Amino acid sequence: MYSNHMYLTNEQVSNKNNQLKIDLYHGTSTLFIESIIKNGLGGVNPVEDWKLLELGREVFDLSKIHLRNSELFERSSASFQNMTEQTKTGSFNWQHGATYLSPAEKTAVSYATRKQYGSELLTYTLEFLRELINLKISYVTRDLYQRHSKVFNLIEARPSPILIQVKDVFKDSLLNELGEDPTSSLQSIEKEINDFPETYEDVLQQCNFRLTKAIPASQLKFWLINITEWNQFSPAYKLYELKKPKE
């Protein structure tokens, strides 16, 4: 599904109403689909609502004590620490809370299929939290659970990856990935479309935007992602449209 290609009608990325003529994409999981349909994409911030950053920082501090010799800590602690500190390191953006969109369908699909719960910070927090629970640490199973029971109750959830196709995005509802003016990123997209109209998505896989205004469900299409051949960064997949329920 490369709807961007047939959506373009001229060399401009946006129309006279300041809306993008290309679709943007967001990868997440079915865990959030009901909220998105009800409140729009970007209408609810689970990082704030669930105090997820507060929990993640505490889980990481506990992991430094109890999981330091584990395979999980060795493999993932550096990334998890960057998330809890909300750092920017070179081309890597570890800041969470905003909704990110990509002009490349493959980028959104890769994100959704590599993050079990549809959120990077939530996925890492729950992976480490699961190991702490297995150690039967009373502070974790009692005190931490009482303060963050909603997140704890997601540990056994098995959501499926979904792709959200976003149409007619207004330019003034976007920032670039680092939270800055998106003009240069949009100009790069226009250049790539003009130079490589059939393959520009491959070139723009690292070009992402932050959404600053919620987008209603009427502008969204939801697709269930079925992985047919696994590859961590570029899996082969098929998409099946999920119809929104009638009100």
Image (cartoon, grey):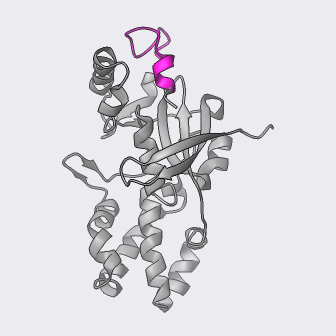
Residue 5 drawn at (x, y percent): 46, 20
Point out residue 63 in the picture as x, y percentages from the top left corner: 35, 80
Point out residue 201 in the picture as x, y percentages from the top left corner: 37, 30
Q: Is residue 22 visible?
A: no
Residue in the picture at 51% in, 25% down? 3
Decide if residue 190 is in sight here. yes
Q: Can you name the residue that lies furthest to the left here?
A: 90
Dividing the picture into quarters, in which one does residue 132 lie?
bottom left
Q: Of helix, strand and loop, which mostly describes the magenta segment?
A: loop
Pick the residue in front: 242 or 177. 242
Q: Is residue 206 left or right of residue 161?
A: left
Question: Disc count in the image?
Answer: 0
Q: Is residue 84 left or right of residue 219?
A: left
Residue 144 screen position, x and y as percent: 51, 79
Q: Which residues are magenta?
A: 3-20
Residue in view at x 31 percent, y 29 percent? 181
